[in-house]
Every structure is written in C-alpha cells, then in structure tokens.
Image: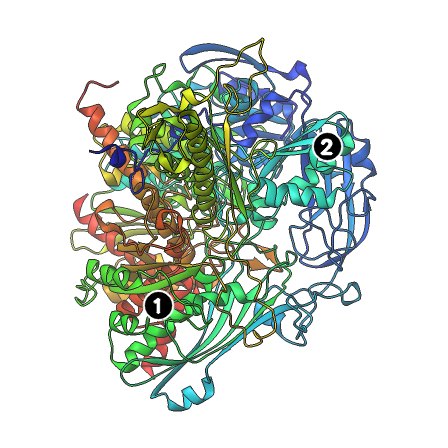
C-alpha cells in the first residue's frame, strides 16, 4: 500500500476544501475496516487518503424535532447500543449489531458502511425502510438524498469528488409501526450476509397495512426495494397467504449473482424464506410500538 | 506418595512447557525474527491466474529495473532447482517453466527492499499465457479420455508402485484382494451400494507458512522456518535441490510454530527463499499471504469412494467392494496411489472378503498434502454412511451393527495384520450412551428439525521412518533432551519431558527439552500420521535408558560394583551390595582442574550423552513378491480409534445445520498427558465440524472462489456447542509397543464427525447426504428433491 | 519506501508509555507495533481482517490492528499483549489461559487474550453466551475454543471475586 498524501482535517469545511483540491484520486478513511484491507491488497491505490477521524461533530447522535440524526462517523458498536434508537428505529441497531465482530464494530462507522456501497451492507436495508436521508456537504453547499437513491452500483454512490456524507436523518415513525432486519448467513455475524431483508409495516386501528417497505440486500447491484410486493400488501390485512405471495414476488424481483457466499438460486430461495419471517415479525412488532 | 509415584509423570496433566511465553507474547515465531535483520529482503510471487496455460513469454525487465528490487526469479533461470519431475511444472514452490498447471502456481518471484516494492515490481511483469484445457473435477480427471493435467508432449505422471497408468492423469493405484468377494456377495442376504464424495479443504492454521533465510559469507544458509521436519524435510530437500550447498553449511531451525495439521510437510517456501539468499547474499524473508495459503499451499486430498457392502440377515458384514480415487492436485507426488485413503476402509471392521481398487489422479488444482487423517476422514465418510444404510435395511440400530462387526483385539484385519490394540467398542458404547441414541429427539413444530447419529473411526499410523533423540545428563544432574521432532502446538515437548522424567524417576523441573535445530539436535523425519508420541517417544526412552546405563556403569565403578547393582532415581545412584547407600549423580563427575588433564571418565562440564534411535518396522513388504494380493502382515504400525455422537438441528427452510450436543471418545493408548489429549479432541472435533458442514474450496472457471478467511468458512465460537453440551472421554486400549503403552491420537478424532452428523440429519429430516461438506445449500437441495419425489 | 517528507507525527500511548512516532502514514498499526517498536506479540494471520490474531485494545476496546492506519492511533491509548501483565505478575486472563490448557500452538493466543479482556471490560459479568458472541472474531484451529471459553469464565470469576487487578 502506498499513498502520497494523508490529511486529517479538523472540520467538515476543511475536509471539503481538501477534497475539492485533490480531485478524484482520493479515498476517505472512516473506520477503515474495509478500506485498509483493500489498500493492503492493492485493490485500491488512491493517491490521497483523507481521514475523517479528527472531526468530532461527525460522531454525534441527536434527537431533533424532525427525527433522529446519526453522524456518519458514529461507530457501529455505539449505534448498536444507542438508547436513542427505540421502537421502529431499533432496526438500525440490529443492522449495526450484525456487522462482523466486536473488534470491527468498535472501529467501523455507520457512514462508512453506506459509503462502501456494498450490496450486502447490513445497516443499509434497515436505514432504507426507515426512510433515512443522507445529508451531504460539498464544495457547492449541502444537499440531502434519500438513502435509497444514494447508491448507484456496487461500490458507487452519488457523492461527487468534493462531497462527503456527514449524517443520516431518520424520520419519525407512525404509531403501530414495526421494523425488522434479518441477516441470513452461515456463520452469523462473522460472515458477510448471503442476503439481508428489512421490512417495515405500519398498521391502522383495524390492523390493515397503511404503509409497508421491504428492502433486500445482497440480491442486486445495490440494496433494492420491492414496490410490487409492497403494493400487494398495502391496504390489506396481513394473512399468511398474502405474506407468502409477497415473499414470492420479492424472490422473483431480485437479480442476485452466484459468488463464494451462495448461488443465485439459493439467494432467491432465501429471499422467499426471510421476507416471510421479516413481514410476520414486523407485523408483530407493529402491535407493540 | 512414594518417590516412585511422585516421579511417575505418565497420565498426569503436567503444564505445558511453552505457555508462559505464549501467554505473554514473548514466544518467537519465525516472522518475529524479522526485526533482528537490518538488511532483510522481502519475497513476493506472481501467480498463475489460469488453471492450465502455456507460458508464451515473460517480460520482467521493468521489474528488474525498479529501484529496490534485488533479484527476479523465473522458471527458466539456470540456477533454479529442478528435480525428478518429468513434466513441466514448478518443484516445491519454485516458479513454473513452460506451463502452469493450476491457478495459484508461482510464475515470477521478486526479492526487494520492502514488501511494497516487491508488490509494485510484480505489477510491472508482463506474462503472456496461452490458455489450455483443464480439469479440476477428480471424477472427470480419472476418465481414460480425460483432458490431461499437463500438456501430453511434456509427459504424463507415471504410476507409483510400478502400476501402469490407466488414463492421462492416473498416477498410481493400490489394489487388495482378501477372500472371495463375488462369492460372498452371492451369499449375502442384503447388499447396499452408494457413491460418496469428500471435498477439498485447507488446514488453515492461523500462522501463514514462511521462512527467513540468513546468508553466511562463504555460501552457507541458516533457515528459520515454520516448515515441518528440520532434518527429514527441509534440510534433505534443500541439499537435494542445491548441490552447491554442503550439509555442514545448511542449518535449519524451527522456532515456535503456529499449527500445521499436515499442510507444511512439503517445503514450499524454503527452496525459493534459499535461492534468493544465495543469489543476493542477503537475508531473505518469504511469508505466504492468506490468499496464497489457500491457492498455493497444499489442500487435503479429496476422495471419491464407490462402496458396496454385503451382509447376512444377522448383521454380519461378509463382503466389501470399494473403488476409490484420491485427488492429488496438480503437482506433489510421492506417495499417492490410493493406499493411504483406502486404509480407513480396512481398519475398523472385520470383513472376511474385501476387494479394494484404489487410485490417485491429478487435477489442475493446488497440490495436495496431508490434512489430519491422511484421507481417512474422506474415505470413512463412505463406510460409516453406508453402514447406516445397511443397518436400516437390516432393521438394526447403528450401535448394534457396529459392535457386531468391529475388529476385536487378536483378530486379523483385511491386510492380514493382527490387531494389537483397539478400544473402539467402549468408545462407541460411550457416545451412544452420552447422547441417548435410543431416545428420539423432541420436535417443536418449527423449521428446525432434530436428530441424532453416531459413527466409528480408525486411522493407521503410517511407517514414516526414523526418529533419534539424545539425552544429556549434565554434570549437575540436570537432564536435557535433544530432539528434532516438530512442535506445532500439540504439546510434544511436554509429553517427551514427562517420559524422560519418569525414566529417570526425577523431578520434572530438572528436565529440559531442546528442539529442532539441525546444528544441535539429531535426526527426526517429520511430524505426521500421529507418529511423534510413538516414534520420537520411543527414541527418547531408548536415549534415556542409554544414559542411565552409562551412569550406572560410572557409579558402579566408583564403588566397585557391577552396573546391575545400581539404580538411578531422584538424581542419585543407589547401590545394592555396598556399604555406601547412594551417591548424587552430580558427584559422579570429577571436578575440573585447570592444571591437570584429568582422567577418562565423567568430568564436570561434559554431560553423559545417551543416544536413542527408533525406527518403526519398515514397510519392506508393500511391493515384494508374495504380496501381489496387496496384503502383508505389517502394512502399518498400529491404529488409533475414535467414536463420535451428535445431536443436531437441521433447518428445513434453509438447509442450515447446528450441532446442539456432542460426545467424542478416543482410544489413545495409555494417555501421557490427559489435558493435552483433551485439547486434541476439542480441536479435532471443531476442525471436523467445519469441513463436515461448511468449509471447502469452491471453484469457478478453474479458480478457487473463496481464498480468504471470510468466504472460507472456518468454525468460530458460535458454531461450537456450549460447554455443557461438549462432552469427551479418553477410553484407552494400551499399545504394547508404544512408549508407556501410548499411541498417537490426533487424527482419528476427526473421522467420525461428518458421518455422525449425516446420520443425525437423516433422522431429523429423512435425507441422506453423500457429499461432504454438507453445506446448507446442498442439504436444502436434498430436502427439495425429497419434497418433489414425495409429491409424486 | 515513502518519502520522509510525507511522514506524519503520531502521538499516542502504548502500554502505558507516551510514544511519539514519525512514520509513513500508509502503515498499519500492526506493522508499526511489530516492525518499528518490536512488539511482536501482536500477530498477523490473514490479510483480510478475519482471524483476529492482531487484536489490540484501543482506549480499552478491542480492535483489529491490521485494519487500522497508524494515523488512527493518534491520541489513543493502545494496549498490546506485552502490556497486560504487571511485571512478572500475569494478568488473571493470562493465568487462566495457562491454568485451563487454553493454549496450544499459541499463535491466536495474544489476540484471544486481548479480546477476552475487552469482553470483560464491556461486561464484567459476561455469560458463556456473551463470551462466545464477543469471541467470534478470533479464529483458532487448535483448541476448538472449549478450553478458551472455560478460561475466560474462570478469569471473570476470579476478577469478580476481587484480589486481582
């Protein structure tokens, strides 16, 4: 591994300035648990590394009027234990707690997990169904993007060269909302997910579905939603039959690949199994929140 | 407690000698010596991306010109070491010459001032390949019309043991005929037959393979390595490969090492590092990356077994016919002919009629070498599974059919060997009892289904040559053992120390073990086939007895008695027939005086040196006249046995398997150190759990898809059952010729784990896996296939 | 080799001692520990952040030193296996690993001990399940983890009973 320059800005402004000066051959270092491995294997050879570790404001987690703000540099371990993440927001804790081992979670960050743009990132499906918004700062000002629209392909995001992710905003959730994330892998959290399924269900007083979101990880170039299955469930009571149909639709709508973790056929089959479990569990959670 | 009991350390869990340094981080493994060298060069290797290709051209000029590059090695260089391999491939890890025969084979190597520069240099090398047809599936490779692993014009692998090759990739075969199999099948009431496959896997010890080679002016080298066999493997190979090095200029040291499990039995890093050191006259460090550990260091040898058993109604198995093919990978040869793998199918059950046709075949995959069990976990996978099928047909339970058919002490096995030690019956009964095999699992109506299974196993000890030991009795009475056996973590330094202290009837604190430095310690072959306790252990006992004999003689002379009147214990010589009761051993040594030359006899500062050489019965009769049927009264040295029982959960939606409860039993012979034996049991069980349900090499386009510790799924703490559900027992049958009646035990533990899990899966969910590992995907496919066929 | 002009200064505390490093920023923490400071007790078993042999404590929390650039150590308190004993008096975790035969080849041991200490730092009453959950980022091929977990439970009980550390 070799890079020519290493910067450690103290503020977001300073960071954006450096990014704008350095051009495209830059990598931002958050926790580094993924980046450093890829630098060492020479899969990535940036000229410049900009560390975000000296910008304290990026680690803040705060509850505001319009939702919960989690800084991009919040460590996954802290997110997985955060007492601010209650009710339907617990899905974000689950995802953060599913990433690898204690050693990794202590260092890796929520923002890093998104900016890697891995299709199997454990925190992303939960954030997507929660309607999370990515707050971005760049040379030309700030912008906010629905996290769902943040990813453009494996390893690719909408971030321009002079932009950085600073925080996530998770909007407030309605009453009777339940959200559940299930990671499916062979060795639990040690493994990268074969698939990840997040589901969020909001019910009305008659227990009909008012709002439902399903997000799948590990089955397409980015984390995807399943609008067809969501449409099927909307306005209806969740029966086993209906859930099974939604699970089949979800399975049919994904385009997984075969890799060392699983074949595409197995991934599709697992989507069917886990969408079913997730929807059932989310509906149950909805009764509690 | 009498003195004798106090100094009998056999069967006592004496603390390991190396734990303080290991617990504090002070233990020095080979890579930790790097910081001592200021002039160190680092080696990095460019490897073939193709399973089979002709090397059209290599342009390394830009790499050679890069500042900081000390030397570049290609297969066509004149000083590279070649050996007796007639076809084009690298020899023991050195770069390939004309063609590459597996993805991961070395093509160009660079030594540079830093790892960074070496890696940069490799990126500047331009290699033009012409891809050739390849074969990675061993059953394909076995066919008479298979694609040849090497280009045919470069020659094919000749058979081993004088057998004519039966296809382009068949390297050798071993056949055995015992009784009349066809007649026995005709007489059988029940016949069962099935094909089984066990996969390709890597030992994955946590310390990667590597060496530091220090160059000495005048052309000598000191090799600090975690490779096995400082004399038997490393030094022997280096001397053969580099004839310019004389024996007195090659010193091999094995420091503390981090596991091997068979993987390091071939010198894959030392030859290249030595070549680089000789060229550059510098100290060279060569450490494999984890990826290289998977793609370029040896895997096990996968085994395909087609097995047929015939039995009488009462459950007596009377006929066994097996066709077995072991996959040797692309390159390593030597002992591959199917004999090692098939041995597992002939050492557990007393079957009067056996026909064994076993073969070894090459494939375009990383070379194969021992992996804890020498192919027996792979072949007995077939036997134990098929016995369960047979038991079901006969309406017998799995314990009953096994107890009825296992070999008993004094009986003769299919090889014609008399069984001298077998504790398998007790092992089987204990596992069946521990998991309550007769009591069906409670089902809870969820996706997890529960079942139980048991299996048996045996493993031969291959006659792997000579071990020597020196026993020094220093003139202060302290004892030092000099041995070259490998210590890869199993604790042999501690057990040998226990043996020596017991022989001398002395406080164990007075015994030290000095190990594995060819300049100091005597010859030993290498640590394989669970041989060290037995072979090196016997050598140590002989060395101790030799030293004791010399002390008796010296002590007897002192007081005018014959040596038979003298006993050595507690650091003293005791006399019968003298008015002197005893003399301290230290007092037998005459004080050294500067002005006198002293006399013959024991002198302060010069230890008594006892010599021990032990060579197990050589396998002279393997190929000789009169043994055309493959049988001989001494094929192997002895057998270790084990049984395993498990309660498992199978997820019918995902195919996942969890081990809820397990019991492992081991016939270890008389155990020298029970806690160390327990450690071997625990580690063996979990290693086997991994390759039974998860970890294996996966190939796509001829390349390994999962050469990293993320996708190569080794068991973690989460796959291991809780303490209260992890049971084990040592149930020894003493080995008459073992040191203190001990035998080696680390391999048999592995063997029954997979089949017992398979039996439990069958009980849980009604499908019988035939392929190992039983991955979630494979199990789910069996479940879906069953659902489809049940629906018809 | 890096141009020295690019070197960065990193002040941190390693095993209780203030350290002021001037190093190339592209080096990992484990590389600096082993090759600059001679603290070779921290091991490297893989190149992909999975084996856990390189585990150290950063401000008391377990981290994999192979996946951290040296700049990330700035102003941190780093503890390696060399820093856990009190002179010749072993840390109760080290003693428990010895007492329970939890060490075989020993290569994973430093990382295991550091992770184990971190588990109890987080939760002094960690149950067997908590210990297994905390330890799954450390691979061992010799012990089957059985005696390792047993040792950590024993260390937990001894530490909680007081009198040690």
**C-alpha gap between disc 1 and disc 2:** 55 Å
| Residue B385 rendering spot, x and y as whole percentages | 37, 70
Tags 1 and 2 both on a single chain? yes
| Residue B529 rendering spot, x and y as whole percentages | 48, 53
How many circles with numbers are drawn on the protein?
2
| Residue B18 rendering spot, x and y as whole percentages | 41, 30
Give me the chain letter of mark 1: B
Q: Quadrant of residue B451?
A: bottom left
Q: Quadrant of residue A252?
A: bottom left
Q: How is the image coloured?
A: rainbow
Q: Residue at x 58, y 59 (%)?
A: B700
Query: Can residue A85 be seen from the camera position used here?
Result: no
Q: Quadrant of residue B443?
A: bottom left
- Residue C2 higher or lower than B674, as above or below: above
Callout 1 environment at 10 Å: few (<14), some (14 to 19), or many (20+)?
few
- Please tell me whether mark 1 sits on a helix, a strand or a loop: loop
- Residue B17 higher or lower than B362, as above or below: above
Between B631 and B714, the one nearer to me in the picture: B631
| Residue B606 rendering spot, x and y as whole percentages | 53, 23
Q: Which is more N-terminal, label 2 or label 1?
A: 2
Give me the chain letter of mark 2: B
Between A180 and B462, the one nearer to me in the picture: B462
Of badges 1 and 2, the one in the foreground is: 1
| Quarter containing the C terminus of chain C | top left
Query: Can residue B340 be seen from the camera position used here?
Result: yes
Left or right: residue A2 versus residue B244 is left
Between B220 and B212, the one nearer to me in the picture: B220
The answer to whether marks 1 and 2 mark residues whose Cβ atoms lie closer than 8 Å is no
The residue indicated by pointer 2 is B277
The residue indicated by pointer 1 is B410
């Amino acid at each position: 591994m070799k890079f020519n320059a290493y910067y450690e800005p103290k503020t977001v402004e300073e960071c954006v300035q450096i990014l704008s000066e350095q051009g495209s051959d830059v990598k931002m270092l958050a926790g580094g648990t993924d980046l450093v491995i890829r630098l060492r294997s020479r899969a990535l050879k940036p000229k410049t590394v900009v560390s975000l570790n000296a910008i304290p404001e990026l680690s803040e987690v705060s509850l505001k009027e319009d939702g919960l703000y989690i800084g991009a540099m919040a460590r996954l371990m802290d997110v997985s234990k955060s007492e601010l993440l209650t009710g339907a927001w617990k899905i974000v804790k689950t995802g953060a707690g599913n990433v690898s081992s204690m050693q990794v979670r202590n260092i890796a960050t929520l923002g890093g997990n998104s900016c890697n743009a891995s299709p199997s990132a454990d925190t992303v499906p939960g954030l997507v169904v929660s309607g999370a918004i990515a707050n971005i700062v760049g040379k030309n000002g700030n912008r906010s993007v629905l996290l769902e629209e943040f990813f453009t392909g494996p390893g690719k995001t909408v971030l321009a060269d002079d932009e950085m992710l600073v925080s996530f905003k998770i909007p407030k959730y309605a009453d009777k909302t339940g959200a559940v994330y299930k990671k499916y892998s062979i060795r639990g959290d040690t493994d990268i997910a074969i698939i990840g399924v997040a589901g969020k269900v909001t019910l009305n007083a008659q227990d009909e579905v008012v709002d439902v979101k399903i997000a799948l990880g590990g089955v397409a170039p980015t984390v995807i939603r399943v609008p067809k299955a969501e449409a099927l469930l909307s306005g209806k009571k969740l029966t086993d039959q209906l859930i099974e149909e939604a699970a089949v639709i979800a399975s049919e709508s994904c385009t997984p690949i075969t890799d060392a973790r699983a074949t595409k056929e197995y991934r599709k089959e697992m989507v069917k199994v886990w969408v079913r479990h997730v929807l059932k569990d989310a509906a149950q959670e909805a009764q509690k929140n | 407690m009498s003195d004798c009991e106090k100094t009998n350390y056999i069967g006592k869990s004496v603390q390991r000698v190396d734990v303080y340094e290991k617990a504090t981080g002070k233990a020095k493994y080979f890579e930790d010596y790097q910081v001592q060298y200021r002039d160190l060069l680092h080696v990095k290797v460019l490897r073939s991306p193709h399973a089979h290709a002709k090397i059209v051209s290599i342009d390394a000029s830009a790499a050679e010109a890069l500042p900081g590059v000390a030397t570049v090695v290609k297969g066509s260089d004149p000083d590279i070491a070649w050996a007796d391999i007639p076809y084009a491939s690298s020899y023991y890890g050195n770069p390939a010459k004309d063609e590459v025969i597996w993805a991961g084979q070395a093509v160009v190597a660079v030594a540079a001032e830093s790892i960074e520069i070496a890696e940069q240099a490799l990126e500047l090398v331009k290699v033009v390949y012409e891809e050739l047809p390849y074969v990675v599936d061993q059953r394909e490779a076995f066919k008479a019309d298979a694609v040849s692993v090497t280009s045919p014009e470069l020659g094919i692998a000749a058979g081993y043991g004088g057998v004519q090759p039966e296809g382009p990739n068949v390297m050798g075969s071993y056949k055995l005929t015992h009784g009349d199999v066809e007649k026995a099948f005709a007489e059988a009431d029940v016949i069962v037959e099935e094909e089984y496959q066990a996969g390709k896997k890597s030992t994955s010890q946590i310390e990667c393979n590597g060496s530091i080679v220090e160059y000495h002016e005048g052309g000598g080298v000191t090799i600090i390595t975690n490779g096995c066999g400082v004399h038997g493997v490393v030094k022997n190979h280096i001397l053969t490969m580099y004839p310019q090095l004389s024996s007195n200029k090659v010193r091999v040291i094995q420091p503390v090492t981090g596991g091997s499990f068979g993987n390091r039995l071939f010198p894959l890093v030392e030859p290249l590092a030595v070549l680089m050191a000789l060229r550059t006259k510098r100290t060279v460090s060569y450490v494999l990356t984890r990826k290289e550990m998977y793609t370029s260091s040896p895997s096990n040898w996968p085994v395909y077994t087609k097995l047929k058993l015939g039995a009488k109604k009462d459950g007596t198995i009377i006929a066994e016919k097996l066709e077995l093919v072991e996959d040797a990978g692309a390159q390593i040869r030597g002992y591959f002919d199917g004999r090692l793998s098939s041995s597992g199918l002939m050492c557990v059950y007393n079957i009067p009629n056996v026909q064994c046709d076993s073969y070894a075949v090459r494939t375009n995959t990383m070379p194969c070498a021992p992996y804890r069990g020498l192919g027996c976990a792979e072949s007995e996978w077939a036997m134990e599974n098929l016995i369960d099928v047979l038991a079901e047909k006969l309406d017998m339970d799995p314990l009953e059919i096994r107890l009825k058919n296992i070999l008993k002490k004094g009986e003769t096995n299919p090889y014609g060997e008399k069984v001298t030690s077998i504790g398998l019956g007790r092992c089987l009964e204990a596992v069946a009892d521990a998991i309550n095999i007769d009591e069906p699992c409670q089902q809870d109506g969820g996706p997890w289904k529960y079942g139980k299974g048991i299996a048996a196993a045996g493993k031969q000890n291959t006659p792997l040559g000579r071990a020597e030991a020196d026993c020094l009795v220093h003139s202060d009475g302290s004892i030092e053992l000099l041995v070259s056996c490998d210590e890869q973590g199993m604790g042999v330094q501690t057990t040998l120390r226990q043996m020596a202290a017991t022989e001398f009837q002395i406080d164990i604190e007075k015994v030290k073990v000095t190990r594995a430095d060819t300049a100091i310690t005597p010859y030993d072959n290498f640590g394989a086939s669970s041989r060290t306790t037995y072979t090196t252990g016997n050598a140590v006992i002989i060395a101790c007895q030799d030293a004791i004999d010399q002390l008796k003689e010296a002590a007897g002379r002192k007081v005018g008695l014959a040596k038979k009147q003298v006993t050595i214990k507690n650091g003293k010589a005791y006399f019968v027939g003298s008015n002197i009761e005893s003399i301290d051993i230290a007092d037998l040594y005459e004080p050294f005086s500067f002005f006198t030359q002293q006399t013959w006899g024991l002198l302060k500062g010069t230890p008594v040196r006892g010599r021990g050489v032990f060579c197990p019965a050589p396998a002279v009769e393997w190929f000789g006249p009169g043994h055309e049927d493959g049988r001989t009264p001494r094929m192997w040295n002895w057998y270790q046995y084990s049984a395993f029982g498990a309660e498992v959960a199978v997820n019918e939606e995902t195919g996942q398997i969890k081990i809820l409860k397990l019991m492992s039993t081991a016939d270890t012979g008389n155990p020298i150190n029970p806690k160390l034996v327990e450690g071997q049991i625990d580690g063996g069980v979990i290693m086997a759990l991994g390759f039974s349900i998860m970890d294996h090499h996966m190939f796509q386009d001829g390349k390994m898809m999962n050469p990293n510790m993320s996708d190569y799924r080794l068991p973690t703490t989460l796959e291991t059952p809780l303490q209260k559900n992890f049971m084990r027992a040592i149930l020894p049958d003493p080995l008459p010729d073992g040191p203190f009646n001990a035998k080696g035990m680390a391999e048999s533990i592995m063997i029954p784990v997979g089949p017992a899990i398979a039996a439990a899966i069958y009980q849980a969910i009604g499908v019988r896996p035939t392929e190992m590992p039983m991955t979630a995907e494979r199990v789910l496919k069996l479940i879906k296939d069953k659902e489809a066929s049940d629906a018809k | 080799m890096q141009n020295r002009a690019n070197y960065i200064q990193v002040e941190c505390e390693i095993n209780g001692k203030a350290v002021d490093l001037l190093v190339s920023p592209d080096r990992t923490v484990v590389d600096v520990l082993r090759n600059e400071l001679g603290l070779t007790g921290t091991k490297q078993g893989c190149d992909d952040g999975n084996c856990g042999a390189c585990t150290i404590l950063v401000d008391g929390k377990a981290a994999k030193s192979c996946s951290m650039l040296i700049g990330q150590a700035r102003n941190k308190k780093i503890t390696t296996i060399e820093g856990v004993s009190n002179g010749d008096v072993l840390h109760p975790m080290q003693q428990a690993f010895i007492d329970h035969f939890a060490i075989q080849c020993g290569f994973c041991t430093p990382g295991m001990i550091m992770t184990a200490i971190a588990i109890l730092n987080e939760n002094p009453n960690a149950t067997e399940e908590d210990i297994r959950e905390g330890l799954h980022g450390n691979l061992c091929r010799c012990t089957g983890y059985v005696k390792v977990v047993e040792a950590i439970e024993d260390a937990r009980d001894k530490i909680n009973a007081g009198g040690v550390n």
